[in-house]
Amino acid sequence: MENRMAHEFDYDLISLGAGSGGLSVVERAASYGQRCAVIERGKIGGTCVNVGCVPKKIMWFGANLAEMIKDAEGYGYDLTCNGFDWPKLIDRREKYIDAINTWYHGYLKELGIDEIDGEARFVDANTVEVNGTHVSARDIVIATGTVPSLPDIPGIEHAITSDGFFALQKQPERVAIVGSGYIAVELAGVLNALGSKVSLFLRKEHVLGEFDSLMQTTLMERLGQSGIELRLRCQVMEIKRNKAGKLELQDTHGVGMDDVDQVIYAIGRHAELDTLKLENAGVAVTDSGFIESDLYQRTNQANIFALGDITGRAALTPVAIAAGRRLADRLYDAQSDRHLDYELIPTVVFSHPPIATIGATEEAARAEFGDRVRVYQTRFTAMFNSISGHDVPTAMKLVCLDEEEKIIGCHMIGPTVDEMLQGFAVAIRMGACKKDFDDTVAIHPTSAEELVTMR
């Protein structure tokens, strides 16, 4: 093992940020005997645990139950919904998150990892200042994540972001959501299923711009069918609060919207770098405002690394965790080439219905490989929905390359696809071809069997 123990420093490794990436790298480094600390200005667990993946999925589960109550009639149940208690769901959600936070504190203590509360600023390449005290380390990892972006328009102070959504103590009756990415469609689906009246403002004519076209069109159809108002090529230009406390909007077409309870922006996230004082350590930043790093998480400074959303690459919790663990393996366990492969990363959008995807879209594949691309796809209504009368579409696509039909992309939308993709992602990463799928015996009757029976 490379000898990186340098006791002239307070620690061998400090992580700036106790989110998914920061926690994963110090946990793995501590297992290799390194002296570690994490510095966090907010709640432990970062965005994912507190205002991201975890609370989002709980709200999604709640929204799914609302839909299943409607499904029950088709299966012979005589059910009535006597109301929905938003504060009760929020209370249980926050207790669940608090339990995760508490566990993290205990786990770090058990591993001998120090927690330092506060905001870190670089003094030099080996030293940061936090709460007026200098703390040094041989290696420093920057894993401070990103924050939601807001536009500069009149009245923007009346709007909230996804962070604000998770702070709502009362369910809004009328909501305007601005954005077309995965956060926007997830929040729109949750609020709509729970009974809020939702309008979705899209800058272009579709959602999920970087996703396969089959996913875009299928979800767009379902959003409209579910009662969400889609305002295409339209943006909010001004927000005002009236005497009754409601919000009034003006959009790019000069159309107003009155009696809005909440305006939620989900137009992207950006890195807050100013407080880090990166210039004191000489850390380079990209033109798009993220920390410049390579596939080994290295910045331009030999002992400073960057993990997770702060790098501007694949802003997903499991990506940050995987990159952090691999970085510690390389630095402290002599795994000299250990790093995360950023290709073929599976991901799920928890829309209604969910989307699961890995690899190249058909559009990207054809742009790169032309006629060498072969595509197989199917569209159907799953058995559960056929019986329930809740007409939710399922659509699947395999993107294959060359005569051997190596699978370079898999895209699915529909109920339960979020649980299907993980196993198929393993096969695709191992280089599976269409024939491998064809030669696999189908599990019947399931929606997943369509992936191994497609013609």
Image (cartoon, grey):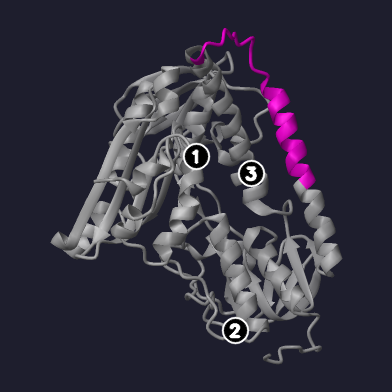
Label 1, label 2: how far apart the Cα atoms are: 36 Å
> Is residue 151 in view from this perspective?
no
Disc 3: which residue: 54
Q: Position of residue 229 (x, y in %)?
A: 38, 23
Number of residues whose C-alpha sits closer than 10 Å to that of mark 3, classed few (under 14), some (14–19) or many (20 or more): some
Label 3, label 2: how far apart the Cα atoms are: 32 Å
- Say which of 183 and 357 sits in front: 357
What is the span of residues highlighted in magenta in the rendered image?
A: 75-99
Residue at 26%, 58% (x, y): give it.
400
- Say which of 287 and 232 sits in front: 232
Residue at 35%, 47% (x, y): give it.
451
Q: Position of residue 175 (x, y in %)?
A: 50, 24
Residue 96 highlighted magenta (yes or no):
yes
Q: Secondary structure at mark 2?
A: loop
- Residue 335 numbered mark, or none: 2
Label 3, label 1: how far apart the Cα atoms are: 12 Å
Relative to 278, say whether 312 is above or below. Answer: above
> Is residue 301 in view from this perspective?
yes
Label 3 or label 1, whichever comes before in sequence order: 3
Name which quarter of the figure residue 24 lies in: bottom right
Quick one: quadrant of the N terminus? Answer: bottom right
Q: Secondary structure at mark 3?
A: helix
Disc 1: which residue: 350
Q: Secondary structure at mark 1?
A: loop
Label 3 or label 2, whichever comes before in sequence order: 3
Q: Residue furthest left?
A: 371
Q: Position of residue 306 (x, y in %)?
A: 57, 70
Residue at 71%, 89% (x, y): give it.
4
Number of residues whose C-alpha sits closer than 10 Å to that of mark 1, classed few (under 14), some (14–19) or many (20 or more): many
Relative to 17, say whether 381 is above or below. Answer: above
Relative to 175, say whether 312 is above or below. Answer: below
